[in-house]
Amino acid sequence: MKKILTGLWLLILLVIIGTLFWYNELRYQLPTPLPANYTSVKRGTLIQLPDNLKHKNGKPLFLHFFNPDCPCSRFNINQFKALVNQYGKRVDFKIIAVTKYKYTAEDIRKKFDLNIPVIFDNGISTLCGVYSTPQVALLDEHGKLYYRGNYNKSRYCTDERTSYATIALNGVIKNQRRLLFDKLALTSYGCSLPGCKN
């Protein structure tokens, strides 16, 4: 009887550990479900941004869609900072904060050690076809969508061979119009907007 109870207890523990692992790991490796009212935005579409985001200096514009409550966004922040450091003189970077909680731009800049404009406007994600975080919307110097997708195929943004955001940045800077991305670059992974409900 004691062996049966011990075996049952171990089985319950394994089920709990497996459930926690699935909840915290596997769910972020599945594509983010498309929202019911989602409308895709094609590459080359002119994005009509609000005045506070409009192109003023002829540089490409990199919009980083970020949710401070999303684990995937937090894992991604170091890669985003590295891109800002590397390309900040040739490309404008802005953070589009999409969250259901009350944050200020200063809260986000301080918490994540960023010196980038932070805009709170959920409508921009719809304009760019973004429905999860973290995501990139890269607009060329004319305000047309050049790339909308992932930073990397890895949740932890460490796979240099599939560094899609870097590939897109290099492409827009070199004015490469025929740059192609695979399905992993264009299928959203991470947290659904506006909260983390994937």
Image: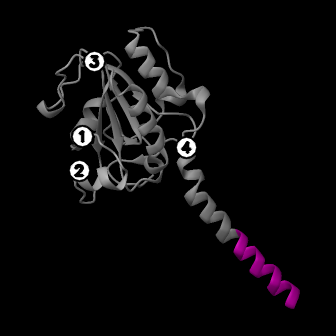
Amino acid identity at mark 3: Lys
* Amino acid under disc 4: Arg
Distance, label 3 to label 1, CA atoms, is 20 Å
Q: Residues within 10 Å of mark 1 (few under 14, many from 20)?
A: some
Residue linked to disc 2: 105
What is the magenta range? 1-14
Sequence-first tag of 3 and 2: 2
Secondary structure category for the residue under label 4 = loop
Q: Which mark is residue 184?
A: none
Circle 1 or circle 4, nearest the eye? 1
- The reply to whether dot 2 and dot 4 touch (C-beta < 8 Å) is no
Image point (27%, 56%), residue name: 107
Left or right: residue 143 versus residue 198 is left
Q: Which residue is mark 4?
A: 155
Which amino acid is tagged 2?
Answer: Ala
Q: CB under 8 Å between callouts 1 and 2?
A: yes
Q: CA distance from mark 1 to mark 2?
A: 8 Å
User: In the rendered image, which residue does mark 3 sit on?
Assistant: 144
